[in-house]
Image (cartoon, rainbow, N blue to C red):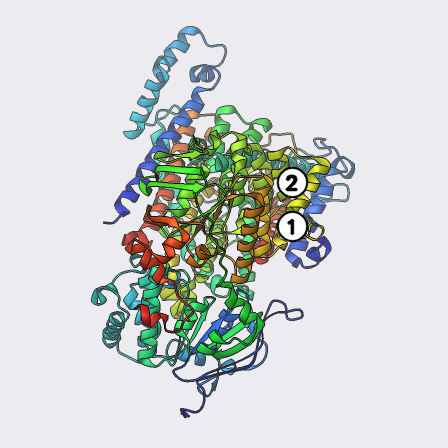
Amino acid sequence: MSPVPKLILQRLVLGVVTLFLVSALIFVGIELQPGDLAEQILGQSATPDTLAAWRAELGLDLPPHVRYLNWLGGVMQGDLGNSLASRRPVADLLSQRLANTMFLAGYAAVISVPVAVVLGLLAALWRNGIFDRGVNVGALSAISMPEFFVAYVLILVFSIQLGWFPTLARIDEAQSLGDALYRCFLPALTLMLVVVAHMMRMTRAAVINVLASPYIEMARLKGVPRWRIILRHALPNAAAPIINVVALNLAYLIVGVVVVEAVFSYPGMGQLLVDAVSSRDLPVVQAVGLFFAATYVTLNVLADILSILSNPRLRRG
Amino acid sequence: MNKTPMTPLLEMRGLRLEAGPVKSPTVILHGLDLTLRRGEVLGLVGESGAGKSSAGLAAMGVVRDGVRFAGGSVRFDGVTLTDLSPAKLRRLLGRRMAYVAQSAAASFNPAHRVLDQVTEAPVLHQTASRSQAQQEAIALFRQMQLPDPDQIGLRYPHQLSGGQLQRAMTGMAMACRPDLIVFDEPTTALDVTTQIEVLGAMRDIVEHFGTAAIYITHDLAVVSQMADRVMVMRDGREVETQRTREILSDPQQDYTRSLWAVRSLERPAKPADTPPLVECRDLTAAYGEVTVLKDVSVRLPTGRTTTVVGESGSGKTTLARVIAGLLPPVSGEVLWQGQPLPPDYARRDPALLQDIQMIYQMADTALNPRHTVRETLTRPARFCRGLSGRTLEARVRELMDLIEMPPGQFLDRRIPELSGGQKQRIGIARALAAEPKFLICDEVTSALDQLVAQGILRLLMRLQDELDLTLLFITHDLATVRAVADQVVIMQQGRIVEQGPRQQIFDSPQQAYTRRLLDAVPQMDPDWLSRVR
Amino acid sequence: MTVTTTLKSAPPTAWFGMAVVALTIVVALGAPWIAPYAETEIVGAQFQPWSAAHPLGTDNLGRDMLSRMIFGARNTVGLAMLTTGMAFAAGSVLGMLAALRGGWTDQLLSRAIDVVMAVPPLILALMMLAIVGASIPNMVAVIAFIYIAPVYRLARAAAMNVVRLDFIEAARLRGEGTLWLMRREVLPNIASTLIAEFGLRFCFVFLFIAALSFLGIGIQPPTADWGSMVKDNATLITFGDVTPLIPAGAIALLTVAINFIVDWMLHRASGLKT
């Protein structure tokens, strides 16, 4: 009897419940606003008749729980409502930007995960040595810097002074993949620097934790060589925490795009969200926020599931 | 190779180990000399901090992180280990020298099958092919009397019991037929009835292969079963070394004699015929779904000591928690002087709470490390008895006198500055500050060294007589029972197996389990293990 | 160890950190006396280059950059302190309460915190600010609310480790109340953890406020603050002018400094245990 399927199911259900709660929270928050959307859009001077017409169009005349369910039903079918600012369907606004954001985050992830894991492993292996201290100071500094600082320094050096990369990361569908990768290099690098630092520190901590176990000492006393201790005795047990670290940081990466997109005027979800917040375009805020939350929750659930799967005690119950 | 039988297998000369800063080091071993012949078993005995584990590892040329060789030498079969490069030492480790650790559960890698771990050293050191090593491992499992030896190696460590893992680890140490095995407290974490089986299996296999061994323990009775010679250590130095029979019958040093004397502490039992202060009726208790206490009925006579004895999982601590009101029972009730006691401590009135006080196993966690001794004692004296000002100060000093610690010297010390025994005394004083009628002592001596434990037991007995306390004494150690009990309750798997006056339980046990438990307690007699098996 | 010997053992990184923090505090407290011009005073043309009169030039509205940097220290750091302090007060009290009470108190609080933690902080803040509108009090309240969650989790976990210990049980068994347990038994034992965490959380909050201001949703004009100063003057970068990097660099410098100090403290704490 393996308890694994049950545990995984629990995590999945928990994830879905969390998403529902988040969506309800967003909805309630918007409900709590003084006045309603119709008044906001049309302003104080609107006549009662136009207000009523607007309310009917937006479905504001229905009771809140019905509207919540309607909205949720719409979301399930890909109908996210209309933007207040442009009056276009939110789904249309989202589709291309979603792909752009995923492209940028994926780009950064593909490079940063292996780099961070290898750096973390090496730092743990040579802990308290020169390499470890150097990497640690570097990582601490990278974590401490605001993304926009890193981004502007990179722009100043690589595009203004050296002229190697464009200052703005404008991409469109006509570009080739190589071209897109070239244009997005600086934003991806910015994201990477921050994420690698986090991921590397956590990997190092996880590996050091495992290396302190009595079974590692036992392996040492059996005359097992150092490389074999790492590969055979430490890594299988450090895998779960490392996988967890990676998934958590990918979740972080998804959020990090907001600021980076703003710096590079990159046409992604983050930009859209910031613009919508500034203009208080609530349907867009709602949809984009829900998307970010969903990605974040999914990655966290994934982290949980992967660490369950890689735990030998659970796997073979 | 010079394998003349005359040269000892292992020779330590003036070995000095240090830790901490080089300028002001903490010395762990002060120039230890140790000689071990081929096929000989040497017991290393001492209290915690004596340096016996460090000496055991040093015999393999290894030190723990932060510790360093600071003088002297270790020669193993003509090779000076202290001069060896790590790579050369590694070729000896596991192949010619092996180690058996205290916690087998933590020392097996959870990610690999037991068999793969047992065969790792022979395959790595190329003393056997993989299939050969596996065959031999299975033979070793059989010799170690593990159940289902052909298949058991295919399981993962968490699927084996503690006793099985300890035997598998001994098999792992034997896998390359080493010349030397270091056993570091291998049975300390086991229950007595498991310990006896593991000890027997270990002794047989060491004898069978004629392996030399260093057996490290704090338990004199255990070492007298295993060792040919015994070295007593204290504070990183040798106290004396003798053949086992001689050191048992005729110890030369005062320190050794004082260690021996601990085991003979025994207070005459008082008749348990006073009216009960506490009475449990048909108690059944559970943690979630798991029932840990089943239909337990027991009366604790006023002014007497009742000891509850059992192995891990017997429910003895749960019984204490139910009486203290920390775990309300599923059914049954606790009576206090004939009146039902509210099951949850939060529903008991303050006077009742003060009457029942607890003393804990781990003095380290029983006292708030952020407080001073004074703060620890004034709070209960003020909170429970409403004392203040001069009467409070006088009471705190009186409490310190009761536990035989000079108030002037200790009152303003912080808790972390105290030794284990001193902390335990402060724990007792804190309980007494509430002026209780009833003291629950949960394994109060099992984390302490024997000499210190003896002092605590004497103190508790004196306090009981002076203050007319009723004691509930939870323990797994039958020597403690013999020392203090008026009435004995034997528990197993949540039930009471047998109860009665101490003399009756020890002299004419009625139940098979009681007899098994009593028989499993190692005696200070080198022939005991052979006799009982 | 005394304070002096402790300080002597500090590595250069920690010394650097302490120097930067001290300097920042002095500048923040003395802003009105140190700054050559007032916070919102327009002193010249837009985007003037560095000169004797304006050592860092002027900004997009013609205000003195240096003066705004000095006032920005006070505003950005002060608000971050206030926000972190609020989050800590609420989070640690709730965390200790959950650990001590257990049962449904713990369940209710922990599940609510789980939901807050399920949304990335920046996204949650943006959504909440979209609802309540961007202003300084709103921003402080929203960020403090969001950061109650991690502080709660840490305080609860740390308090749980203490609550399991026997001295808590002993105190309970003599009838001590929750408040006393919290104040005298638990808090002294988790204080060092909380202080180190305060340093780290302050960094997060500080970066967070800077990011929000940079996005134009945090501290609102004309209040001087380092995040929005970067945003307002970002165009200069394209002309190779490093001026906008100065407020950004100040943010980075202060955060690095605090992280170095906290890292040293944590390292010392873990070293002392063994």
Q: Nearer the viewer, mark 1 or mark 2?
A: 2
Q: Which residue is at 44% across, 49% downward?
A: A183
Q: Are marks 1 and 2 on the same chain?
A: yes
The answer to which quarter of the image holds residue B481 is bottom left
Real-space Cα distance between discs 1 and 2?
14 Å
Residue pictured at 54% horizontal, 31% vertical = B350
Q: Which residue is mark 1?
A: B414
**Residue ID for mark 2:** B378
Identified at 34% across, 56% down, the residue is B508
Where is residue A119 shown, x and y percent of the image?
Answer: 46, 60
Left or right: C208 as drawn, with respect to B77: right
User: Which residue is at the front of the view, B136 or A291?
Assistant: B136
Q: Residues within 10 Å of mark 2 (few under 14, many from 20)?
A: some
Q: Quadrant of residue B436?
A: top right
Q: Given the image, what chain letter belongs to the residue carrying mark 1?
A: B
Which of B402/A190 is in front? Answer: B402
Q: Where does the N terminus of chain B fall, quadrant-wise? A: bottom left
For numbered disc 2, what is the local secondary structure? Answer: helix
- Mark 1 or 2, nearer chain start: 2
Q: Chain of mark 2?
A: B
Viewer-side residue, A105 vs C46: A105
Query: Which residue type carries mark 1?
Result: Arg
Specify whether A253 is left or right of C55. left
Q: Quadrant of the C terminus of chain B?
A: bottom left
Please tell me which residue lies in front, B56 or B106: B56
Q: Is residue B71 left or right of residue C160?
A: right
* Residue A66 visible, this angle: yes
For mark 1, does the 10 Å Cα neighbourhood hold few (<14), some (14 to 19), or many (20 or more) residues? some
Residue A116 coordinates in the image, percent (x, y): 45, 56
**Residue B180: percent from the left, percent from the top?**
40, 79
Where is residue C159 drawn, in percent x and y? 52, 42
Dot 1: element: loop
